[in-house]
Amino acid sequence: MVDDKELLQNPLTLTDGAVEQLRRLMEEKGVPEGHSLRVGVKGGGCAGFSYILGFDLPKENDGHFEINGIPVIMDKAHAIYLVGIEIDFVQGLNNRGFTFNNPNAKESCGCGTSFSA
């Protein structure tokens, strides 16, 4: 069980597969110095919220942390929707891409990229 203090320091988990894929993307895309992995949410999608995952410069209201050498940023206001989330990367016959296992989601859509809270 993860305690509250640990969640505040590392509010999300990246699996080994996600870390490997993110490092590959950072190298292939030439992510500029100072950019971090932004994890967030935005209104929309078939279930109410969609996930944000991309590289960005930190903003004033961002929380900053590091997971396996990858700098991560998250708007502090998004934490209510994302604390405890696990991000994975899958390569299967039917699916290939990042997946989100969100304990805060009441419902998820079939595509797995949007949820309701």
Image (tube, rainbow, N blue to C red):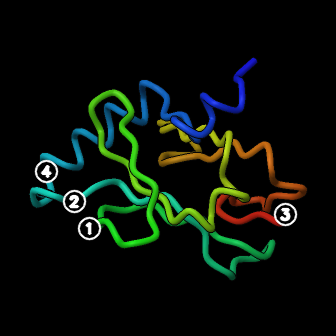
How far across and down, in percent of the image, does residue 89 sit?
48, 38
Distance from Cα at disc 4 to Cα at disc 1: 18 Å
Q: Dot 2 corresponds to which residue?
A: 35
Distance from Cα at disc 1 to Cα at disc 3: 27 Å
Mark count: 4
Residue 4 occupies which quadrant of the picture?
top right
Q: Dot 1 corresponds to which residue?
A: 57
The local crowd at label 1, few if under 14, some if 14 to 19, many if 20 or more residues have their Cα within 10 Å, is: few
Residue 44 occupies which quadrant of the picture?
bottom right
Under mark 3, the amino acid is Ala
Q: Dot 4 corresponds to which residue?
A: 28
In front: label 3 or label 4: 3
**73 lies left or right of 93:** left
In front: label 2 or label 4: 2
Earlier-in-chain disc, 2 versus 3 = 2
Which disc number belongs to residue 117?
3
Vertical relation: 72 (above or below) 20: below
Whether the residues at callouts 2 and 1 have beta carbons within 8 Å, the answer is yes
Earlier-in-chain disc, 4 versus 1 = 4
Tell which of 24 and 55 is nearer to you.
Answer: 55
